[in-house]
Image: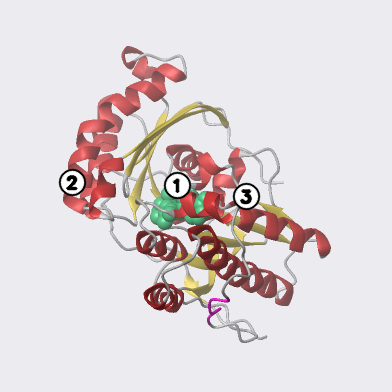
Amino acid sequence: MIALPKTGVLLGIESSCDETSAAVLRNGELASVVVSSQFFHERFGGVVPELASRAHVRAILPIVRAALNQAALSIDEMDSVDAIAVTHAPGLMGSLLAGLNFAKGLALGLGVPLIGVHHIEAHIFSVLLEEHHPDFPFIALIVSGGHTMLVLVNDIGHYELLGETLDDAAGEAFDKVGKLLGMGYPAGPEIDKLARTGDPHFIRFPRAMMEEGNSDFSFSGIKTSVSNWLKKHSEYSISDIAASFQRAVVDVLVTKTINVAESLEVRDIVSAGGVSANSELRERFQKECSRRTMRFFAPRPLFSTDNAAMIAMLGALKLTRGQASDLSLTAMPRKPLAERTIHPA
Ligand code: KG4
Ligand code: ZN
């Protein structure tokens, strides 16, 4: 069981992509979280970076104010905030800067510590916002719109990259296939919903890179395969396509994660990031883990997608370990979480 940090009142801020979010953590307990999603990107079929950063600049103060209010603090009671955690990497440069500069200004004004947080690392520890926690070491599958990776988590700050996508992220595949099916952006939640009424065996879409010992992923082929199939057929039910596509992606994600956990004799598995909100993915993990006396952990959907509660949680863990940042902290669009390691099969 990972001990929850007791750090007074900590404000978390997230703005790395298209969600502006703020959260308050009070002695390790979540007091509030507010997430504002930029739905206007839908008409462009993806996030437009310049528009995203402008929207963050507009939203950040009202969102922070709302998170403070929800935690029964007003903006005039800001001096009861003891520390500020903010995402500084990776993400869209302009979006990161909007949150980071706001957080720096606040930290400077209040004279409290600033803690720079790695967005992917925060996804891994988002599970600490739930009642049940994994033990170290555990395997984390991070599946979002920008990332798909398998990480061996030995301790906080001690990670080994076991595998990653060589092309599209799993969430990107959901979004691109959704676009082919005429859905809005992001399409993951809608595919998830439609798939429940479809036949997952309607078409067998390819499962890439399934050879034993391979922990990397590739999702661009499945998108092409769905596109080719749709070009050749005119009569079908969208639910069947959604279910067949989702079944293929879930098969790959679950099989590879379980395989690497078994080969490393690791018992606990965590799935985090937007795609981990997927209902079939959770059910399959739960089923496969309980068959093997392994344990599966995932944050609730609100904490699976981008949110500041996870930023506050990791910020608090880092603060208790003396890992505050200074005001020279920079926004970094890219920042690898871990070195790649090859474990013998
Ligand atoms: O973690 P996240 O909010 O943002 C990134 O850091 O990328 O993940 C967003 C991604 C999108 O691609 C979205 O389609 C996907 O997560 N997603 C889902 C579901 N909910 C969100 N994919 C499949 N099933 C879902 N229920
Ligand atoms: Zn994310």
Along the line of sight, which residue is nearer the eye, 269 or 236?
236
Vertical order, 245 against 134 (above or below): below
Q: Name the residue under label 2.
A: 51
Examine the image and state in which quarter residue 195 appears.
bottom right
Where disc 2 sits, the SS reads helix
Q: Can residue 144 be seen in this view?
A: yes
Looking at the image, is mark 1 or mark 2 nearer the viewer? 2
Q: Mark 1 points at which residue?
A: 323
Vertical order, 323 against 103 (above or below): below
Q: Which mark is residue 120?
A: none
Question: Within 10 angstroms of label 2, few (less than 14), some, or many (20 or more) residues?
Answer: some
The image position of residue 55, as x and y in percent, is 21, 38
Q: Distance between the residues labelled 3 and 1?
A: 26 Å
Going 59% across and 61% down the picture, which residue do you hit?
140
Looking at the image, is mark 3 or mark 1 nearer the viewer? 3
Query: Is disc 1's CB within 8 Å of ligand 2?
Result: no
Q: Mark 3 points at which residue?
A: 298
Going 29% across and 48% down the picture, which residue do you hit?
42
The image position of residue 202, as x and y in percent, is 59, 70
- Image: magenta residue range: 204-208
Question: Within 10 angstroms of label 1, few (less than 14), some, or many (20 or more) residues?
Answer: some
Kind of residue at badge 1: Gln
The image position of residue 269, as x and y in percent, is 67, 59
Does label 3 or label 1 sit earlier along the sequence? 3
Q: How far apart are marks 3 and 2 (CA)?
A: 31 Å
Q: What residue occupies the far front of the structure in this picture?
A: 235
Vertical order, 282 against 217 (above or below): above
Q: Quadrant of the C terminus?
A: bottom right
